[in-house]
Image: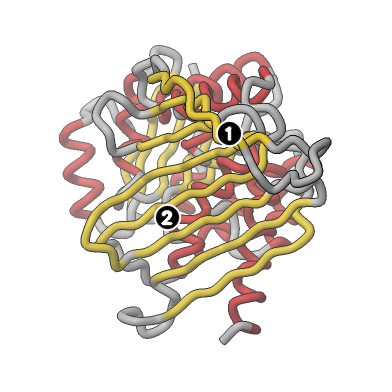
Amino acid sequence: MVKVGIVGLGYWGPNLLRNFSQHPYTDVYGICDIDSSKVDKLSAKYKEISFITTDYKELLKEDIDLVAIATPPETHYEIAKEALMAGKHILVEKPFTRTTREAEELIELAERKNLKIFVDHTFVFHPVVRKIKEIIDSGELGEVYYFDSERINLGLLQTGVNVIWDLAVHDFSIICYLFPDVNFVKINAFGSKHIHPYYEDIAHVMLESDNGLIAHVHVSWLSPVKIRKTIIGGKDKMLWWDDIHPFEKLKLYNSRIEIDFSKEDPIRPTYIKGDIITIAIDNYEPLYKEVENIVSCIVEDKEPEVDGYEGLKVVQLLEKCNKVMKRNV
C-alpha cells in the first residue's frame, strides 16, 4: 500500500482525495488544510483517514510515502522542498513551481534523495489527448502545421497567478506531451488586465518551433461562454477536439489544400474536403489514470510519466510568456 498525505483541500484537493481513496493500493493516511472546517468536513466523509491537521509540517512527520500538494502556486516550492527533505515522494498540482530555478532545485534534491516527483498535468492522462497522441504518432495527419486552442470561461479569478499560469498551463502540458521533441525558438504573448487589478485576465500566446510547427493558445477569465476547443492541422488531415461536447469530442477531418508546384501558376490550389470521422474515445477519469501511474511508479520503482522535468518544461514556457508580456505592454 502507498500511504498518502494530501495538503490543500480547496478546489482540487478533494478530487485528489476522492481518487486516491478509490484506488485499491493506496491509503489516504492524512489530510491537511489551514481551514479547519475543510479538514473536518472531509474527515467526516472519509472516516478511514487517520490523521488530520491544519499544519502541513505535522503531516510531514508521519510515516507516509507520498505528499500530494494542492495549495496555491506560490506555496508549492516551500512545501515540496520540505516534503522531499522529509523523505517523501511528491505530487505537485500545476503549475509545478513559480520559477525555473525553484523547479531545478526540487529536481536536484529529489534525485539526490532518490525520491520521485510527479507533476499534476492531468490532461496528459485525458483519453482524448491519448487518442490524439496515437493519431499524430501514426503519421495519419502528415506533417503537423499548427496547434490552435481556446480555453475561455467566466471565472475563476485567481489571486496569485495570471490567466496564462492558470489556464494555458494545461495547453502547454498537452503540447509538450504531443510534441516532446519540438523546440520552441520564438514565443510571443499579449495579455491585458481588464478586471483583475494585478494579473492578466485575457491572453494570447504564440509559440514557433524550429521545425515549422506553430501553436496558438487563447485563454480568458472574461468570456460569457465556456469554450474548450483545440484544432490540430496537418498536411494530410486535421483534428477537432471539443471538450465541452457530451459525446462527439474528437473528429478527424480528411481536409487539406493541395498545390501542384510543377505548373506555371501554382497558386491555384485544390481544396480537398473528404470524410469527417467521429473518433471513439475511452470513458475514464483522467485523474484516476494519473493516480494509477503514480502508484505503479512508486510500487515498482518506475519513472513517472509526468516528472519534474516535464513540469520544468512548462514552467520555462510560462516564465517566458511573463517576460514577453511585460515587453509588450
Check disc 1 and report its element: helix, strand or loop: strand
- Residue 209 horizontal/vertical position (percent): 75, 51
Left or right of 200, for residue 225: left
Residue on which disc 1 sits: 256
| Residue drawn at point x = 33 percent, y = 53 percent | 33
Tell me, for residue 209, which label it has, or none. Answer: none
| Residue drawn at point x = 59 percent, y = 20 percent | 134
Q: Which of 213 and 177 is in front in this view?
A: 213
2 or 1: tag closer to the N-terminus: 2
Q: Is residue 289 above or below residue 53?
A: above
Q: Which of 146 and 33 is in front in this view?
A: 146
Marks 2 and 1, how far apart at CA: 45 Å
Left or right of 116, for residue 227: left
- Residue 279 horizontal/vertical position (percent): 42, 18
Q: Is residue 178 something that shows in the picture?
A: yes
- Residue 28 horizontal/vertical position (percent): 38, 29
Q: In which quarter of the image is residue 275?
A: top left
Q: Residues within 10 Å of mark 2 (few under 14, many from 20)?
A: many
Q: Which of marks 2 and 1 is in front?
A: 1
Q: Nearer the viewer, residue 156 or 182?
A: 182
Check disc 2 and report its element: helix, strand or loop: loop
- Amino acid marked by disc 2: Thr
- Amino acid marked by disc 1: Arg
| Residue drawn at point x = 58 percent, y = 49 percent | 172
Q: In this view, does 326 lie above or below 229?
A: below
Q: In this view, does 297 lie above or below 214?
A: above
**Which quarter shows the C terminus?**
bottom right
Q: Is residue 3 something that shows in the picture?
A: no
| Residue drawn at point x = 63 percent, y = 41 percent | 269
Q: Residues within 10 Å of mark 1 (few under 14, many from 20)?
A: some
Residue on which disc 2 sits: 71
- Residues at discs 2 and 1 in contact (Cβ within 8 Å): no
